[in-house]
Image: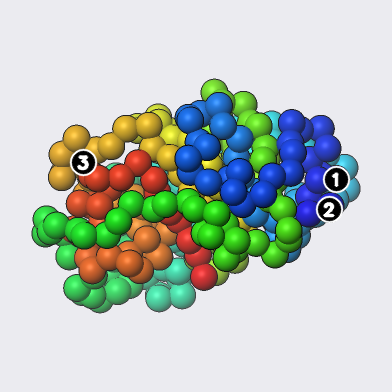
Amino acid sequence: MEEILQYLQQCDIKRCDALEAQTDYVPGRDYPLIIVPGENIVEVLEDALETDEQLSLSEYVAQQSEKAAKMNIAEAFLLKISEEMNFADKSIESLAGAKTEAIFEAYASIWDGDPMLGTEQASSDNEPLELTAEWFEERMEESYLLALKLPEEKPFEAPLWIPMGGYNECPLPVIQSAIFKHFDERIGITPIVVTDSTWVILAKRRPVSFEEALLLAKEHFLFCPYVLEQHDTLGHYADHLLRTDSWLFWWD
């Protein structure tokens, strides 16, 4: 925690406990991002800032935000899946500029017809995520959490102020930022929790049809395939997105 606080000393940040971080205290975009301190966050901050350029955190955010803003969603998704596709000996060269549906179909080929990728509409009985004090306590390695105020007009910069990831299927912060920007432009989002392996996002609106929810579910799967861990199929997950404002992205 002290290392993270040192990196964030220029920011509006304070300590809070698990009870203060509960969902009941989240009134909207003006509520701070809750940080669950961990080693990966520290390591990514070190890699980002302790370079020959000697960037400040705000300079790093500005630099990476510009890169994210220039990245269209096809580029972001293809960068995210490229290593997995290469490992499976699948080509993505023909997908430059492709729409989500085509990129999803190419990525889905890795799973070779797995029934979890079924897109038929199905009713989900999964309960919306509830951020209780117990939820935070299960993930805390320190006795306190951190609450960070971010520029509310740029929620897509959250992965740059608190960078994490860059391991396994979890994309680099700049890719996360580009994908967050896409979600914000389409639905409107507020990042409300970040850990070493997790983002919790509050959507400003829900999909208005199953078709819209299914496209969103495919984008979520491209970003984080673990979204299906607690859902039988993609169709079930799309139904879940029709009934909740909270999105949980988690990587192993």
Residue at image location 78% in from the left, 54% down from the top: 1
- Camera-side residue: 32 or 90? 32
Task: Assess disc 1: are there few (<14), some (14-19) or many (≥20) residues with their C-alpha within 10 Å of its C-alpha.
Answer: few
Instruction: Identify the residue at the far top of this view.
Output: 153
Residue at figure coordinates x 48%, y 61% from the top left: 250
Q: Are marks 1 and 2 in contact (CB under 8 Å)?
A: yes
Q: Which mark is residue 6?
A: 1
> As displayed, is residue 113 above or below residue 158?
below
Mark count: 3
Mark 2 falls on what kind of element?
helix
Q: Amino acid at mark 1?
A: Gln
Residue 3 circle label: 2
Give SS at disc 1: helix
Earlier in the chain: of badge 3 and badge 1, it is: 1
What residue is shown at x 42% (from left), y 52% (from top)?
130
Mark 3, secondary structure of its residue: helix
Name the foreground residue: 189 vs 104.
189
Going by the numbered disc 2, the residue's amino acid type is: Glu
C-beta proximity under 8 Å, tags 2 and 3: no
Q: Above or below — where is 61 with respect to 77?
A: above
Disc 1 from disc 2: Cα separation: 5 Å
Sequence-wise, the earlier of marks 2 and 3 is 2
Find residue 38 and report its image quarter.
bottom right
- In this rendering, the answer to whether 251 lies above or below 7 is below
Q: Which residue is mark 3?
A: 212
The disc label shown at residue 132, or none: none
Residue 48, given in percent of the width and then of the height, sits at: 76, 49
- Between the C-alphas of marks 3 and 1, the distance is 42 Å
